[in-house]
Image (spheres, helix red, strand yellow):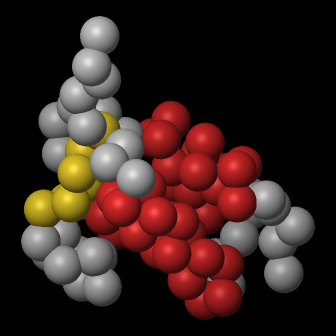
Amino acid sequence: MTEATDTQIDEAILSELEANSLKTARIMVLVGKRFHASDPSFLDRVEARIGVLIEAGSVKLYGNLANWRRSELALMPSDG
């Protein structure tokens, strides 16, 4: 299993996102590649961390997070 912290995963997710929405599946693959991990348990962690970032208001979700191929993610605009 990949020894990445939640903070490292969060930073990787946020660094791959843009103001324009991108497919959730694309973000999952890019973050997995960054940590050289594609095992289901790691991808489950990435999905969970995306959920935390959505709840925190850092990421906007379009669709259903569980359906990676049909949902999209974008950075929320910063206030400032």
Whether residue 28 can be seen here: no
Q: Position of residue 70 (x, y in %)?
A: 15, 75
Q: How many marks can you see? A: 0
Vertical placement of residue 3 versus 14, above or below:
below
Q: Which residue is drawn at 22% across and 51% down?
A: 60
Extreme bottom residue here? 40
Extreme top residue here? 80
Q: In front here: 34 or 66?
A: 66
Q: In which quarter of the image is residue 24?
A: bottom left
Q: Which residue is drawn at 23% across and 28% down?
A: 77
Image quadrant holding the N terminus, namely bottom right
Q: In which quarter of the image is residue 71?
A: bottom left
Q: Where is residue 61 in the image (x, y as percent from the top left)?
A: 21, 60
Q: Position of residue 47 (x, y in %)?
A: 47, 74
Q: Which residue is drawn at 36% across and 61% down?
A: 55
Q: In the rendered view, does 78 fall on the left or right side of 48?
A: left
Vertical placement of residue 14 versus 66, above or below:
above
Image quadrant holding the C terminus, namely top left
Whether residue 13 can be seen here: yes
Q: Position of residue 7 (x, y in %)?
A: 70, 50
Q: Residue at x 61, y 42 (%)?
A: 11
Q: In the rendered view, does 9 fall on the left or right side of 49?
A: right
